[in-house]
Amino acid sequence: MINLRFRANEQNEIIIPKTMKAAYLQKPLEVSVENIEVPSVKGKEVLVKMMAIGICGSDVHYYAHGRIGNRLVQYPHIQGHECAGIVVAAGDEVTRFKIGDRVAIEPGVACLSCDYCKEGRYNLCPDVQFLSTPPVKGAFVQYLKHHENFLFEIPDSLSYEIATLAEPLSVGIHAVRRGNLKPGATVLITGMGPVGLMTVIAAKAFGATEIIVSDMEPLRLVAAKRLGATRAINFTEVDTNDVVNNVTSGQGVDMIIETSGNAKALQSAINMVRRGGTIVAIGFPAMEEVPLNVTKMLQNEIDLFTVYRYTNTYPLAIKILESMGNEIGHVITDRYSLEDINEAMKQAHTNRSGSLKVMVYPN
Ligand SMILES: [Zn+2]
Ligand SMILES: [Zn+2]
């Protein structure tokens, strides 16, 4: 580990402690904070002092159920993958970063030499090491070692907590890219959890002029409007189909992006997208198989794309977040220290109607 090769400025010389706190999921619904050694770095590894970590829906799912599909948590497990921090040490082959750089961390480290990686679809790399996806440990630590290829410098004007949103925003960017969203498009986005909200931002950035959103939580619908949704539908009160028909004179929308994982939302998308339109599925349904009206899809030549994580999105996500200035801070509703991780996870797990993004600050 080379600590002295790169120096922070005189006033804020960086001292790295020997031990640090890390949050271990011991069993479902139970996290304990332990003292462990701060990792050392070599080669192209960079040591990042963690400044903010967002809690993701997938973190909550592993926390509560110990699994997602056939992916089982191996206890004790460290969660967290939406994160940003400051570079405090660098291996001797690191060329892109120096001590003191502020960075957003892209959590999936791909091999960059397999066929998928070479093709640019490194989200499909069979050897990807994705923070917090078992058995890989995650980001709820004070210091994290990460490959320099998956770190991105953030501008001074961007706070660490907003920079963590580059991760869920990446999913939204990947979705609109996969669906080839065109300027002027009319889009329906179903589900306004954090990924849905970030997808609103992405759709707007890519030029959608009508962005209809649906959810059942008023707080989420209000947030969506603040981020650029043109119409917000509470589907417990209003029929989404009727709104789509009204807005598009019965034609259907150009694109539907389904983020909720609700099987019905995916099924009914086929009835609300225009002929020749596009459906992009992000949310994982609770069941593996969902019946879809394929006849209607064929007759209307409807494209269905799926989204698994993202590739090459971080630089753009950071630019979009920077351009939003104060328009996005309201998405972060709850803040906790790493010591209070149990409370933080509980809040994210149980307070759907009162919380959007729950943030943890390890330092
Ligand atoms: Zn996430
Ligand atoms: Zn690969």
Image: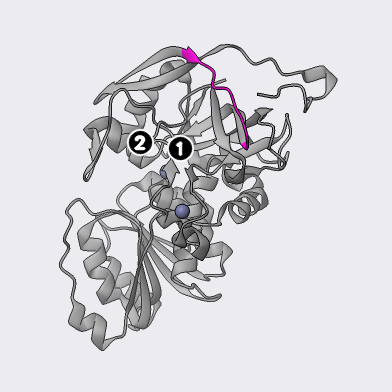
Query: Over which residues does the magenta segment extend?
Result: 36-44
Residue 37 covered by magenta stretch? yes
- What residue would you read off at disc 1? 81
Which of these two is toward me, 139 or 343?
Answer: 139
Please give the name of the residue rendered at 77% of the width and 18% of the height, measured from the top-left corner: 13
Please give the name of the residue rendered at 54% of the width and 40% of the height, measured from the top-left corner: 164
- What residue would you read off at disc 2? 59
Q: Secondary structure at mark 2?
A: helix
Q: Is mark 2 within 8 Å of ligand 1?
A: yes
Residue 304 covered by magenta stretch? no
190 with respect to 161 (left or right):
left
Which of these two is toward me, 332 or 232?
Answer: 332
Question: Marks 2 and 1, how far apart in space?
Answer: 8 Å
| Mark 1 residue type | His
Q: Say few, some or many: other residues with alpha carbon within 10 Å of mark 2 (under 14 / 14 to 19 / 20 or more).
A: many
The spot of residue 231 in percent (x, y) is 43, 63
Which of these two is toward me, 23 or 265?
Answer: 23
Lower position in the chain sequence, tag 2 or tag 1: 2
Quadrant where the N terminus is found in the figure: top right
Q: Are marks 2 and 1 in contact (CB under 8 Å)?
A: yes
Q: Say few, some or many: other residues with alpha carbon within 10 Å of mark 1 (under 14 / 14 to 19 / 20 or more).
A: many
Q: Is mark 1 within 8 Å of ligand 1?
A: yes
**Relative to residue 225, is residue 337 depicted above or below?**
above
Task: Using the rendered image of the protein, determine whether residue 353 is visible from the camera's viewpoint.
Answer: no
Quadrant where the C terminus is found in the figure: top right
> Could you say which disc has been placed on residue 271 in the image?
none
| Mark 2 residue type | Asp
The spot of residue 149 in percent (x, y) is 60, 46
17 with respect to 235 (left or right):
right
**Relative to residue 299, is residue 45 depicted above or below?**
above
Please give the name of the residue rendered at 21% of the width and 44% of the height, measured from the top-left corner: 70
Hey, which residue is sitting farthest right in the picture?
10
